Image (cartoon, rainbow, N blue to C red):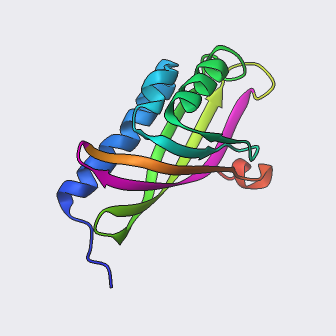
Amino acid sequence: MTEPISSTDRTDIEAAIAKLEAAWNAGDGMAFAAPFAKDADFVNIRADRFSGRETIAAGHDDIFRTIYAGSKNRYAIESIRPLRADVALVHVRAELTAPSGPLAGKHVALYSAVLTREPNGWEIASFHNTLMPPAENARH
């Protein structure tokens, strides 16, 4: 059985997720990618898969200039579950508001992130984002 996550690790993981939210809301792809491992895997809501921090940064810079320009995201951690002492599974509810473009309006998604404790802190090794169906979005 895995030990409960320590308060220090919980705080550090929460800080990594908060950095993602702040970077999204600033429209900063490099800052968004910073909490990811150099070789991270990222799956977006359309099931497109990206590999590596640099690719994640470039992709986010692109969407922040185009379909998600001016958008805001609000993240709420739903759970943090340690898989091992140095690995955690985190589920986060994301509420996106896009002011214009093909995705204008409010969208709710749930993402799963696997974080690993590295010498410089917790890093996101894997990220998988799933858009909730429109009926589910309407309830939130």
- Answer with the quarter of the image where residue 61 lies: top right
- Answer with the quarter of the image where residue 100 lies: top right
Taking the spot 30% from the left edge, 42% from the top edge, the residue there is: 15
Taking the spot 57% from the left edge, 52% from the top edge, the residue there is: 111
Q: Which residue is most to the top?
A: 65
Taking the spot 40% from the left edge, 54% from the top edge, the residue there is: 115
Q: Which residue is most to the front?
A: 39
Examine the structure image and report whether residue 109 is included in the region drawn in magenta: yes
Q: Position of 25 compared to 51: left or right? A: left
Q: Is residue 116 above or below residue 5?
A: above
Where is residue 121 drawn, in percent x and y? 26, 45
**Along the line of sight, which residue is nearer the eye, 8 or 86?**
86
Taking the spot 59% from the left edge, 30% from the top edge, the residue there is: 55
Magenta span dominant secondary structure: strand
The residue stretch that appears in magenta: 104-120
**Along the line of sight, which residue is nearer the eye, 8 or 37?**
37
Where is residue 11 drawn, in percent x and y? 24, 50
Quarter of the picture containing the N terminus is bottom left
Where is residue 39 drawn, in percent x and y? 49, 42
Labels in figure, total: 0
Q: Is residue 26 above or below residue 139?
A: above
Where is residue 6 drawn, in percent x and y? 20, 64
**Along the line of sight, which residue is nearer the eye, 95 or 44?**
44
**Along the line of sight, which residue is nearer the eye, 47 or 73?**
47
Examine the structure image and report whether residue 106 is included in the region drawn in magenta: yes
